[in-house]
Image: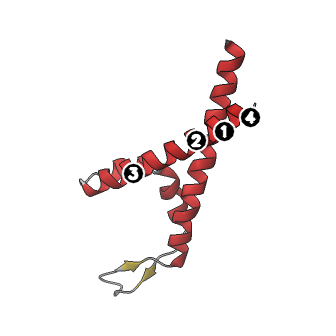
Amino acid sequence: MLKRVLVAFVVGLFATGLLMGLSFVADSFGFPKIASALFWQNTLLQSYAPLGNIGTAAHPVYEGSPLNFLAFLASISLGFIVYGVLAYAALTWARRRA
């Protein structure tokens, strides 16, 4: 059981880091939709953080706030939790099947 938890922990960290890195690479190559899909948890949480318009009504310019940074940090934790739980479930299912 402890081994499964540790493996799920490592898989959660690795999957979150890998997908976050691939998201930044995809965005730098000009594929923002793929980047948003790879780092879906950040896309989800950023949609709840308000943006401030520092431009005019005719030409809006949106700027992030500290809430956007907190949403980014929370998205890393959310990814780790989701992928870790999925890895634990998959390891438990594989163990019962064997």
Residue pictured at 46% horizontal, 81% vertical: 52
User: At which x and y percent is residue 51?
Assistant: 47, 76
Q: Which residue is mark 3?
A: 21
Is disc 2 surrounded by few (<14), some (14 to 19) or many (20+) residues within 10 Å? some
Q: Is residue 78 left or right of residue 54?
A: right
Answer with the quarter of the image where residue 92 lies: top right
Q: Reading the chain from its start, which is encountered first: label 4 or label 3?
A: 4
Which numbered disc, 2 or 4, marks the residue that appears first in the sequence?
4
- Name the residue carrying label 2: 10
Give coordinates of residue 46: x percent, y percent: 50, 64
Q: Which mark is residue 35?
A: none
* Gap in angstroms between the C-alphas marked 2 and 3: 16 Å
Does 69 sit above or below residue 1? below
Going by the numbered disc 2, the residue's amino acid type is: Val
* Sequence-earlier tag: 2 or 3: 2
Q: Type of residue at label 4?
A: Leu
Q: How crowded is the residue under tag 1: few (<14 C-alpha within 10 Å), some, or many (20+)?
A: few
Closer to the camera in the image, 1 or 49:
1
Q: Are marks 2 and 1 in contact (CB under 8 Å)?
A: yes
Mark 1 lies on residue:
6
What separation in Å lies between label 2 and label 1 (alpha carbons)?
6 Å
Local SS, label 1 = helix
Query: Disc 4 vs disc 3: Cβ atoms closer than 8 Å?
Result: no
Of marks 1 and 3, the one in the foreground: 1
Contact, mark 1 vs mark 4 (Cβ under 8 Å) = yes
Element type at mark 3: helix
Residue at 56% x, 49% y is 79
Viewer-nearest of labels 4 and 3? 4
Residue 2 numbered mark, or none: 4
